[in-house]
Image (cartoon, coloured by chain):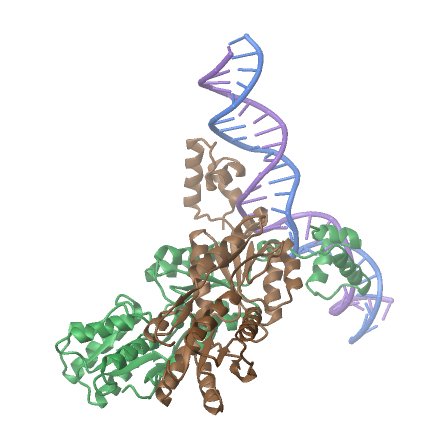
Chain colours: A brown, B green, C purple, D blue
Amino acid sequence: MANIHDIAKMADVSVTTVSRVLNHHPYVSDAKREAVWKAVKESNYYKNINAVNLSTGKTYLIGVVLPYSDHPYFSKLLHAISNQALANQYKLVLFQTNYQKEKELEALEMLKQKQIDGLVICSRANEWNTVEKYAIYGRIALLENSSSKFISTTSINHFDTFLKALEFLYQHNHRKIGYCINRKTGVSSQEREAAYIGFLKQKDLTFHSDYVFDQCLHYQDGEKVYQQLLEMKDPPTALVITSDQVAACLVTCCQRGGIDIPNDLALISYDNHPMAKYMELTTMEIPFDVIGKKLFEQAIEPDSVTHHQLEVRLIKRNTV
Amino acid sequence: MANIHDIAKMADVSVTTVSRVLNHHPYVSDAKREAVWKAVKESNYYKNINAVNLSTGKTYLIGVVLPYSDHPYFSKLLHAISNQALANQYKLVLFQTNYQKEKELEALEMLKQKQIDGLVICSRANEWNTVEKYAIYGRIALLENSSSKFISTTSINHFDTFLKALEFLYQHNHRKIGYCINRKTGVSSQEREAAYIGFLKQKDLTFHSDYVFDQCLHYQDGEKVYQQLLEMKDPPTALVITSDQVAACLVTCCQRGGIDIPNDLALISYDNHPMAKYMELTTMEIPFDVIGKKLFEQAIEPDSVTHHQLEVRLIKRNTV
DNA sequence: TTAGTTTATGAAACGCGTTTCATGTCAACG
DNA sequence: CGTTGACATGAAACGCGTTTCATAAACTAA
């Protein structure tokens, strides 16, 4: 394959001039410009991007770290980030971590080694300090609430959002309210737990540890919740479920099992996936597009560290 | 940042020796090896991957082309490919094309420019010839039925699979069978159409153009089908729907509208998403994991061009 | 002891485009 | 007429790790 030197020889100009033509710099005479393009076409020349990357130190690659790419929540997020990347001539490198620290570290190492220009972390697995250390090597945008000086963040206010959902159920006369989360140890789950505890205290309600359902992420996890509810002597009358998928499965199971929703059991889910509309789920609408856009922008904007927090809208349908 | 030359000076060895130590080559004395590691640690040295990429001509990056990453079909596929990539120390670069030819071309150009080692195309947008031209620059694996000499393929036999579904409905005494597809112009849709036409002919059934529903991809498209069915004077009694999502939405609409499934309308969908189990959909199980694995392997295996075709299993539940 | 390996090490070439700096020309401005 | 700025062009330095080739010492089998 021809390289830029060959082209320079063929067009009888310097490599600098070839580079200028290829990069659309001004200050090249028409004659030389044409000669270069002619040589480029004749030899079917194209740049070696790795040489460009080495030379410029940029790759126009942004890493995206997420646990699973086959879960609607993360794939919506990925979709939104991808759309934004596309619009800005960036490409995305996908890091599917399955919540493994090492996999996330690989992404951080790529940032360090400058194979990617920035990194969007949709769900953090490593310690905060570990991640923060890498901020000196490139831009990191994190989907998490923080006011870090080194890492930009975009997040939704899980505390307020959760409280909003709980309040709504309370207003509908529910006093036995439980909730389902993905991972008890997750950052967002902890914010929600804090909101829940505070809510119970404020309303003078007692805490039932079995009203908290962990490991509810995938569609089929809705059935596990259903089974657990059946076995309970004093089940909750309402649930906040942090995923439309899980809620949809639960609703389906309840329909089949003769549990009336919302009368026997009220539900508020999260995401507002199209499915939520048809399953008539009352849900908290997550603004995926906005989150994806902000995260991407934070991952490419130079220097400044910013923090966004987004509002979540309660969409009332028929499960409360 | 220190580079390999600095390390060489610090450790008082040649860059070759440093390179050897860093890449775990034998033939380095213990003394020098230690000196190099010491220098590496002291100066917090790490390789510039772009220099490595330039030098070796490899990037350990595989491109994945798909129209949407937020659709379960494609995100399952992506997930499977990603798992395989992870297991082989490769990273994935995502190209979300939204079926735009130019976006797909960008991926092909990256292959040409050696920024990626191989390319998996999950849904082709460009002409066959256009894609095939790029096979000389790197490995291409395509999710499509073909016996190309230059491009490896993995696919499911859409013709037979569709026929299997149609036959099953026929055995259940359906004579007015329609189907829903994603894109009429898509390769798989054409194979299905061929199967459908052949089936009608063989069974001596007449073709109704309004029994074919195009543009059924997303969950909410199920409602469009429902609306259209309501307006038809002589609606089909059975449908093959190439997505669990669409089928699930349609089932939900039918339940609400008082259309009895399977008695008024029988359905066979595709994918066998977890949702299909709970919605009790009779479905054609797509082996995403196997497809993803094969595609990835084809995208990295050197030289040989292979073709796989996978079987699809009919999972009987309660919509037929 | 000789011939043939194996181990060890470094110089130099290689992969290739970008960018700074120096130099030169020509037209416009005062 | 001299200065200034816009336009044009190329040499050379820069980014940096890998790999081939040559060389030499140490060891082993005959």
Residue B257: image quadrant is bottom left
Residue closer to the observer: A169 or B63: A169
Residue at image point 66% right, 63% down: A130
Q: Is residue B8 visible?
A: yes
Q: If the image is split into quadrants, where does the C terminus of chain B sit?
A: bottom left
Q: Position of residue B90 (x, y in %)?
A: 55, 66
Residue closer to the observer: A294 or B304: A294
Q: Is residue B64 visible?
A: no
Q: Is residue A292 above or below residue B307?
A: above
Residue B144: image quadrant is bottom left
Q: Position of residue A170 (x, y in %)?
A: 45, 75
Residue closer to the observer: B56 or A72: A72
In the rendered view, does A21 fall on the left or right side of A56? left
Q: Position of residue B9 (x, y in %)?
A: 77, 51
Q: Position of residue A19 (x, y in %)?
A: 51, 40
Number of numbered discs on residues: 0
Q: Is residue B170 above or below residue A35?
A: below
In the rendered view, does B161 fall on the left or right side of B7? left
